Amino acid sequence: MNINKLLESLWGTIIEEFDINMKEHYIKLVIKSCENNIETSFIVIFKDVTAYSWVNSSFEQGKDRSDIEQWTFMDLTSITYNPNAKLNVEGSLLNKKIFAKPNFLLEIWNTMLLIEANKLIINDNVYDLNKDN
């Protein structure tokens, strides 16, 4: 299964609900699209999340969308799957290098959410990312 092909229909949609559950290791999005006056809802769950990072580039760009709490809605500009991405954090408090392999990149307005997850669930369809996709 081509994961990026599945994700294409989510580009340019609206995130109505956004939940990061650290205890249960998932990130859940309720997404709505409206095309040709037909509304479609999606429930997208990143399951078995081992890492995530939010890069808020808008914070450096002034007042335009710098505060996520002031957003009246969240635009999911793009979402892509790349199993070969890597994220390195150096100079942590423990003087250890921290590595993550975020396999999803979500562009929300002009911010980025990087997620490392073992499973993707779209409307109850489960995709095990540890298998060849």
Image (tube, rainbow, N blue to C red):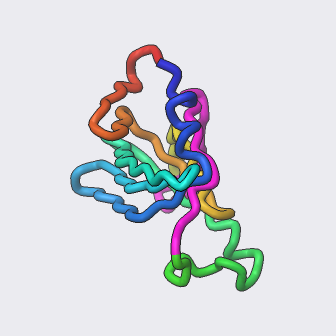
On screen, residue 73 above or below 53: below
Direction right: furthest residue: 61
Looking at the image, which residue is at 39% across and 17% down? Answer: 131
On screen, residue 108 above or below 7: below
Q: Position of residue 25 (x, y in %)?
A: 29, 49
Q: Is residue 84 located in the magenta-colored stretch of the structure? A: yes
Q: Position of residue 53 (x, y in %)?
A: 52, 55
| Magenta-drawn segment | 73-95
Q: Is residue 76 located in the magenta-colored stretch of the structure? A: yes
In front of the other: 66 or 2: 2
In front of the other: 62 or 53: 62
Looking at the image, which residue is at 39% across and 22% down? Answer: 130
Q: Position of residue 15 (x, y in %)?
A: 47, 60
- Confirm whether residue 130 shows in the render: yes
The quadrant where residue 67 appears: bottom right
In front of the other: 94 or 67: 67
In front of the other: 49 or 106: 106
On screen, residue 10 above or below 20: above
Looking at the image, which residue is at 52% across and 60% down? Answer: 14
Looking at the image, which residue is at 31% across and 31% down? Answer: 125
Asked whether, in this view, residue 29 is left or right of residue 110, the answer is left
